[in-house]
Image (cartoon, grey):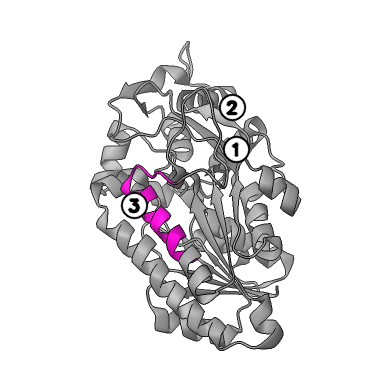
Amino acid sequence: MERVLVTGGAGFIGSAVVRLLVTRGLRVVTVDKLTYSGTLSSLGSVAGAANHRFVEADIADAERIGALLREERIQGVMHLAAESHVDRSIDGPAVFVETNVVGTFRLLEAILGYWDALAGQEREAFRFHHISTDEVYGDLPYDSGVITETTPYAPSSPYSASKAASDHLVRAWHYTYGLPVVLSNCSNNYGPFHFPEKLIPLVILNALEGKPLPLYGRGENVRDWMFVEDNARALELVLTRGRVGQSYNVGGRAERTNLQVVEAICELLDERLPLGGARNRRSLIRFVADRPGHDRRYAIDPSKAELELGWQAEEGFDSGLAKTVDWYLDNPWWWRPLREKRYSGDRLGRTIRAAGPQPGRG
């Protein structure tokens, strides 16, 4: 695998994948529409690399994508482009259907046409890796159960339903047309370059500024957290070692309630930048009305990826969260323009800050 196209490569997880593959020496073509959460500054470290090319394009533009595939003689596609914020999907589901369902369909059509024209070893070696979310499986009880690759789908939000639909399309193109696909479903990611409306960066930045920390319900919802660079390594292995037609769940084995996450961030910031006096940042936590259909718990069992691909999460949650807090403290050049200009005037952005953040994948 020497030439890879990454869709959504200017997003949070996508940019981590691009940075990893470029450092590995692969030729990487990054495609991103640069909607509100696509940020070219996240690719700054590879912007001048001879083996990296950025193309601003829509995955729904099948003709453009097909031309890129042929021009670059692409051997593998990693599909991360998606609308991914649950709150936004509740406020406006249409764009989630357009991007995640229709966009994936158009992309599949372009890729199928390209793959059909390949022959011999090029045709045999080609892979399409579709990256999805654990949210397609629905939620779990607080006290039992884990999500495996055989867990039935039960999406509960417009976002997760649109991702479930895209998963089904990818599998159908494999079984009907023979397109060589692999799939992965990951748990909540966190780390550097995470868009500021998501739970961890939003709490870091609000707490840094001494602003209220809104938390849905009582903060009891549980998520399995994974450092984004661990996920990027896993996604590379799924592409290069995954069995055609198979799906791999990727998680960090680090379940935390949302309240535990927020309290941990408060403690880390209090250690680094005390507010002064007797105040601590836990006092900034504000419990607010829960959002509709808020899943209780996600818990990924990554055993299949660990056993078949030789992957394992390397970063523990406590050390990864500390690294993440330090990164945001050290890199205001990246997040300040986004926080102040890109979505501060957005109606939903205002609602999120007032009502509460959603963990999400970004």
Q: Residue 356's x, y, as percent?
A: 34, 32
* Helix, strand or loop at mark 2: helix
Residue at image coords 55%, 74%: 179
Three-letter amino acid code at the position of disc 3: Lys
Pointer 2 residue: 272
Question: 112 or 174: nearer the eye?
Answer: 174
Q: Which mark is on residue 216? A: none
**Looking at this rendering, what residue extends furthest in the front direction?**
176
Mark-to-mark CA distance, 2 and 1:
9 Å
Please tell me which of labels 3 and 2 falls first in the chain.
2
Start-end of magenta stretch: 153-170
Q: Which mark is on residue 326? A: 1
Residue at image coords 56%, 87%: 71
* Helix, strand or loop at mark 3: helix
Q: Which corner quadrant of the image does residue 135 belong to?
A: top left
Please tell me which of labels 2 and 1 falls first in the chain.
2
* Helix, strand or loop at mark 1: helix
Three-letter amino acid code at the position of disc 1: Asp
Q: Which corner quadrant of the image does residue 213 belong to?
A: top left
Three-letter amino acid code at the position of disc 2: Arg
Question: 277 or 22: nearer the eye?
Answer: 22
Mark 2 and mark 1 in contact? Answer it, CB < 8 Å.
yes
Badge 1, how many Cα within 10 Å: few under 14, some, many 20+? some
Mark-to-mark CA distance, 3 and 2:
27 Å
248 sits left or right of 202 in the view: right
